[in-house]
Image (spheres, coloured by chain):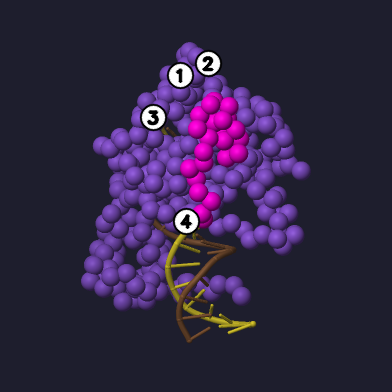
Chain colours: A purple, B brown, C yellow
DNA sequence: AAATCCACCAACCGCTATAAT
DNA sequence: CATTATAGCGGTTGGTGGATT
């Protein structure tokens, strides 16, 4: 089948947009609204392909674009979502109002990924690795450690899920579940989490329903002015980490993500799962990998 | 002051999914 | 059902400006 060129390559301008082009595009959209991108450049008098116009609008000219550096809460959200979902930039963008997938992707690649690799050189993202060696995480901020740990957990779970998926497909007994959060919750990470919760004597009742959860859920509203949730479990983590590593000071700003989540999030089981997983208890957040190492060994 | 390096980010490319015909 | 068109996504590239040598 294949996909034809989105536009006639001849006579189509490329490269940075000029203010005049921006103005033409904005004026056209203000007047006619969003419609067919293919015909837009011609109608608007732009020598650009429709795709380029769409990108320019969604990544730069859209009125609701938020500019400026990422807040600690936004940063933490990206870190955690990446830990759970991987490179799902568009979904992360949907959770961060005013931010674009491109912006988040750039931010990850230029800042967060760098931080990850600098502190976790042992954490080479090696899909084929089934090693259960403990990850050597030296003193870093809790959020950074979480990042490393979650990346590790995600890779392991991903490998296992894909293996399970293959097995299921070969038997033709199950449909692939559409919801990644539910998959994650039902995977080894979620299972191990529930085990630890029980060990700690906490209520282990699952607040995550088995109902499919849409990945296109309502955005998490990161309103720093609202802090309805006491970060109880976060405190537990910080305390144990302080005992473990005296020189490591928790980064208050970054760790406030659970505080900054809106008040009605717990009505949303997706975010509940996220919060529970973020606030994974225990001194070594990922010690369950070692304890339950059989969970993480590929068949 | 010039050359080089590096970080950042806007924009492009190629692909997939889906709707339309 | 097959084909085509379009939107959207993620990976990558290239230009620019600041820092360093």
Residue drawn at x 39%, y 46% as measured from the top left: A267
Disc 1: host chain: A
Q: Which of the labelled discs sits on residue A231, or is there none?
A: 3
In terms of sequence position, does the residue under pointer 2 or pointer 1 come before the other?
1
Q: Nearer the viewer, residue A232 or A16?
A: A232
Q: Nearer the viewer, residue A265 or A143?
A: A265
- Please give the residue where the numbered disc 1 appears in the rendered image: A239
- Please give the residue where the numbered disc 4 appears in the rendered image: A214
* CA gap, disc 2 and disc 1: 9 Å
Disc 3, SS: loop
- Please give the residue where the numbered disc 2 appears in the rendered image: A244
- The mark lying in front, picked from 2 and 1, is 1
Label 1 neighbour load within 10 Å: few <14, some 14-19, many 20+: some
- The mark lying in front, picked from 3 and 2, is 3
* CA gap, disc 4 and disc 1: 35 Å
Q: Are marks 4 and 1 in contact (CB under 8 Å)?
A: no
Could you confirm whether marks 4 and 2 are on the same chain?
Answer: yes
Task: Identify the magenta region.
Answer: A190-212
Q: How many labels, in total?
A: 4
Disc 1, SS: helix
Q: Are marks 3 and 4 in contact (CB under 8 Å)?
A: no
* CA gap, disc 3 and disc 4: 26 Å
Label 4 neighbour load within 10 Å: few <14, some 14-19, many 20+: few
């Amino acid at each position: 089948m294949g996909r034809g060129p989105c536009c006639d390559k001849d006579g189509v301008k490329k490269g940075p947009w000029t203010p005049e082009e921006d103005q033409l595009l904005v004026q056209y959209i203000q007047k006619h609204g969003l419609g067919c991108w293919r015909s837009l450049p011609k109608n608007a008098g732009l020598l650009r392909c429709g795709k380029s116009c769409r990108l320019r609008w969604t990544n730069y000219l859209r009125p609701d674009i938020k500019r400026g550096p990422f807040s600690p809460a936004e940063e933490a959200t990206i870190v955690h979502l990446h830990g759970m979902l991987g490179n799902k930039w568009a979904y992360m963008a949907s959770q961060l109002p005013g931010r674009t997938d491109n912006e988040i992707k750039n931010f990850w690649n230029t800042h967060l990924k760098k931080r990850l690799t600098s502190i976790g050189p042992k954490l080479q993202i090696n899909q084929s690795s089934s090693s259960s060696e403990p990850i050597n995480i030296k003193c870093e901020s809790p959020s950074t450690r979480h990042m490393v740990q979650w990346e590790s957990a995600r890779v392991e779970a991903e490998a296992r899920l894909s293996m399970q998926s293959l097995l299921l497909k070969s038997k033709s007994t199950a449909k692939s579940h559409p919801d990644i959060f539910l998959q994650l919750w039902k995977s080894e990470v979620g299972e191990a989490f529930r085990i630890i919760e029980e060990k700690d004597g906490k209520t282990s009742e699952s607040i995550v329903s088995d109902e499919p959860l849409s990945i296109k859920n309502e955005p998490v509203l990161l309103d720093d002015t609202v802090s309805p949730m006491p970060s109880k479990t976060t405190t537990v983590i910080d305390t144990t980490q302080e005992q473990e590593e005296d020189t490591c000071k928790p980064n208050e700003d970054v760790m406030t993500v659970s505080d900054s989540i809106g008040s009605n999030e717990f009505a949303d089981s997706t975010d509940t799962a996220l919060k529970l997983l973020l606030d994974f208890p225990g001194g070594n957040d990922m010690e369950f990998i070692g304890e339950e190492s059989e969970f993480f060994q590929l068949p």
